[in-house]
Image (tube, helix red, strand yellow):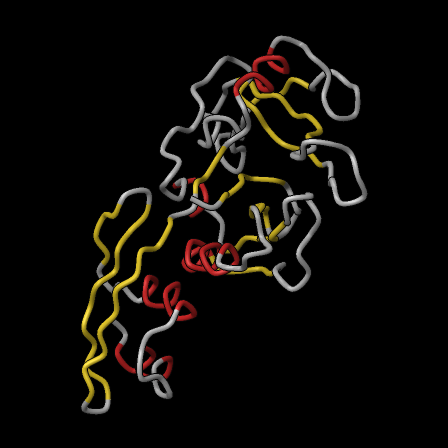
Amino acid sequence: MRKEKLEVILSSANMVTDHHIPFLFSFGVPFESAGNGLRQKHEIRHSGRVIQTMREVKMPLYSALPTEVVRALQAGGVDANGQIAEFSTSDGSSNPCRHCLQDIPLGHGMLILAHRPFARVHPYAETGPVFLCSDQCDRWQSVSNLPPILATSPEYLIKGYDAAERIVYGTGTVVPAITLSASIDAILENPVVAFVHIRSARNNCYQARADKG
């Protein structure tokens, strides 16, 4: 644990509040399983005081593109622009499939298409390019864990949306990959936020979605 930074966070605190949880998580404060989330219990000695914390923390649920949507595209269905996906060959790097959430291997076929990751069309429903394996692949299943593919870029753009799929202003930010998980947790603590979109920081391409656990 980076003690000096933790002391800065807690310098004016007699107790750990909800605000501190994402930061404590990123500093390596231990958590234990508790139902659908985690229960954090820890003692921190600060300025002669022992600070005790205990709180159940719901973990985000990460999701890839739905299989039924992907299978239709792999079978020649049209994308968000009404076009059939382009076929290409992966160069083995920076070609992440948005269904299996893995890089498409070198020399394997891939689809390039326009996707709109929203339930309906409205002013906030962005459409942009994504890659898919051209052959059928298994959907990413470890929904409670940050997909490893989201550690392959130096930083990511994340934005919170409300239940009506409108951007919650003030949540959009570019964060380093090393703090991505904690940053998503912090945004989802906002009661107005229903889900978070994770996008590439440089090209704004959609990567995955995180919902409240």
Residue 100 drawn at (x, y percent) = 45, 26
The residue that appears at 79% across and 20% down in the rendered structure is: 82
Task: State left or right for residue 83 relative to residue 176.
Answer: right
What residue is at 56 percent from the left and 39 percent from the top?
207
Q: Quadrant of the C terminus?
A: top left
Furthest-bottom residue in this view = 47
Q: Which of the pair 211/126 is nearer the observer?
A: 211
Q: Is residue 130 depicted above or below 41 in this figure?
A: above
Task: Find residue 74 and report its horizontal and vertical position in percent.
Answer: 60, 13
Question: Split into 4 quadrants, where in the image is the N terminus?
Answer: bottom left
In the rendering, at what x and y percent does residue 91 appear?
A: 53, 29
The residue nearer to you, when weighing 61 against 17, is: 17
The mark tally for this picture is: 0
Please, is residue 60 above or below residue 85 in the view?
A: below
Q: Is residue 23 left or right of residue 31?
A: right
Which sits in the foreground, 96 or 19? 19
Which residue is the extreme one toward the top?
75
Q: Residue at x 64, y 41 (%)?
A: 205
Q: Which residue is pictured at 63% across the width and 32% down the height? A: 130
Relative to 69, is 144 on the left or the right?
Answer: left
Percent across and percent down for residue 24 are 32, 67
The image quarter containing residue 105 is: top left
